[in-house]
């Protein structure tokens, strides 16, 4: 039985910690602050697929992860006794007549690559649910692959599941690469990209700020909405998560007037939210690798140390598969890292079509 240290109690570190504990090994997660203190403590929790046209390895890997999610989160719920709020409730988007030729290729891609596991379709029948946005041309694009997860409940459930398997989650301890003896997995988000870049002497990524909110509105298991770059996600607890801004430069890490604009846009898109009270305002710094893909692999020059980072905008959706790939590498020496995700090699070059 190996004993593995994971640094960072965000979605990446906790998911890898759980996967290692699930396989019967001892795991110790070390977190500088609290669970979800980085970008994993927000309100949105959309597990939304990439558009299935122009298929590539990143889209394939994310698809596998979205399919794995149901089993992954059911096992976490069972081990922890905490409901992470996972449900595959689907997604609706209002589309314009002029988009239809382009969407044909997307639907063909879904049929070809998602096969029988999930579907995407166009409809002129107004979908059911209180949040469906108006479509001036009367067309909506739907899929039944998109799911939701409560970011905070997922973090709590993973930590409890790790503890239930005999692992530890140590909060309030900041670690540096020189004071941890491997095997160690560095899942330290945006600060971790800066630390890694300083060690390697090259930029490997940067933080991109996002702001999101939660509104009190019970849309139960209605499909989530994607419109004008916004995710509008009904959760099991009677809230709707909405987000996000995407800020490459910022001078503070808290919420500001940009979030008011996001809330106003969501209310305009989904009039049912017009009077829904705002119950949470939140901001986090997403870890974006230069490749915009997840960044995985051995930490160059530090034997026994591994990196799990770069979740950027899809860290929750990718968590099951990244946890599995990381556990395979660290526990069994099996390298299943997808092309373009690797830290050594092409890890910081863009993937074509991504
Ligand atoms: C507004 C917003 C909305 C989002 N919406 C979605 C969404 O709907 N769906 C989706 O899939 N993704 C979404 N994301 C992206 C997702 O949140 C990130 O991809 C994900 O949180 C990254 O997780 P992580 O564990 O890699 O990093 P983090 O969550 O940032 O975790 C890193 C942790 O490491 C700790 N740490 C750092 N350095 C050290 C150290 N030296 N020692 C100890 N601990 C340390 C930090 O305190 C932190 O807790 C969103 C992000 C934002 C900001």
Image (tube, rainbow, N blue to C red):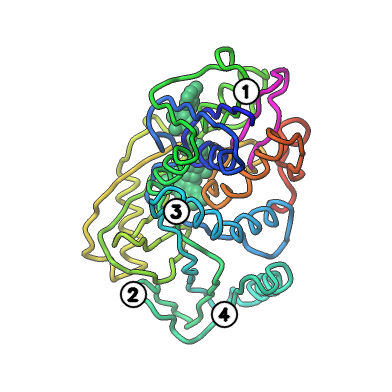
- Residue at x 44% of width, y 79% of height: 136
Q: Which residue is mark 4?
A: 122
Contact flag, marks 4 and 1 (Cβ < 8 Å): no
**Residue 4 horizontal side relative to residue 169, left or right:** right
Q: Residues within 10 Å of mark 3 (few under 14, many from 20)?
A: many
Residue 200 to residue 41: above or below: above
Q: Residues within 10 Å of mark 2 (few under 14, many from 20)?
A: some
Residue 241 lies in quadrant:
bottom left
Give the alpha-carbon distance from disc 2 to disc 1, as whole Å.
46 Å
**Residue 316 horizontal side relative to residue 183, left or right:** left
Contact flag, marks 1 and 3 (Cβ < 8 Å): no
Quick one: label 3 or label 2, which is nearer the N terminus?
3
Q: Which residue is mark 2?
A: 130
Is residue 53 visible from the viewing direction of this image?
Answer: yes
- Residue at x 39% of width, y 71% of height: 222
Residue 205 lies in quadrant:
top right
Magenta-drawn segment: 294-309
Q: Nearer the viewer, mark 3 or mark 2?
A: 3
Give the alpha-carbon distance from disc 2 to disc 4, as whole Å.
19 Å
**Residue 223 horizontal side relative to residue 340, left or right:** left
Q: Which residue is mark 1?
A: 197
Give the alpha-carbon distance from disc 1 to disc 3, as whole Å.
36 Å
Which SS class for mark 1? helix
Q: Which residue is mark 3?
A: 77
Is the shortest distance between ligand 1 and the CB of mark 1 under 8 Å?
no
The N terminus appears in which quarter of the rendering?
top right
Which SS class for mark 2? loop
């Amino acid at each position: 039985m190996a004993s593995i240290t994971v640094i960072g109690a965000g979605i990446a570190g906790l998911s890898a910690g759980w996967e290692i504990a699930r396989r019967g090994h001892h795991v110790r997660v070390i977190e500088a602050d609290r669970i979800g203190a980085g970008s994993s403590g927000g309100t949105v929790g959309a597990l939304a697929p990439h558009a299935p046209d122009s298929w590539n390895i990143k889209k394939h890997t994310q698809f596998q992860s979205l399919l794995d999610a149901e089993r992954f989160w059911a096992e976490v719920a069972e081990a922890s006794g905490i409901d992470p709020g996972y449900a595959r409730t689907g997604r609706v988007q209002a589309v314009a007549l002029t988009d239809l030729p382009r969407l044909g290729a997307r639907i063909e891609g879904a049929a070809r690559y998602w096969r029988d596991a999930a579907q995407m379709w166009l409809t002129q029948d107004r979908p059911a649910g209180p949040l469906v946005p108006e479509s001036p041309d009367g067309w909506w694009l739907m899929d039944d692959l998109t799911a939701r997860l409560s970011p905070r409940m997922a973090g709590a459930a993973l930590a409890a599941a790790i503890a239930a398997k005999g692992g530890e989650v140590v909060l309030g301890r900041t670690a540096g690469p020189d004071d941890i003896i491997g095997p160690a997995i560095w899942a330290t988000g945006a600060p971790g990209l800066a630390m890694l870049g300083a060690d390697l002497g090259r930029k490997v990524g940067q933080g991109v700020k996002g702001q999101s909110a939660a509104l009190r509105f019970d849309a139960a298991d209605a499909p989530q909405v994607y419109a004008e770059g916004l995710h509008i996600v009904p959760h099991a607890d009677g809230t709707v998560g909405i987000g996000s801004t995407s800020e490459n430069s910022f001078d503070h890490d808290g919420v500001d007037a940009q979030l008011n604009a996001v809330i106003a846009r969501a209310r305009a898109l989904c009039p049912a939210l017009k009077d829904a009270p705002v119950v949470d305002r939140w901001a986090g710094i997403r870890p974006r690798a230069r490749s915009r893909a997840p960044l995985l692999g051995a930490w160059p020059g530090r034997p026994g140390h591994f990196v799990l980072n770069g979740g950027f905008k899809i860290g929750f959706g990718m968590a099951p598969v990244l946890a599995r790939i990381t556990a395979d590498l660290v526990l069994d020496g099996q390298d299943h890292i997808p092309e373009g995700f690797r830290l050594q090699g092409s890890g910081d070059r863009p993937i074509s079509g991504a």
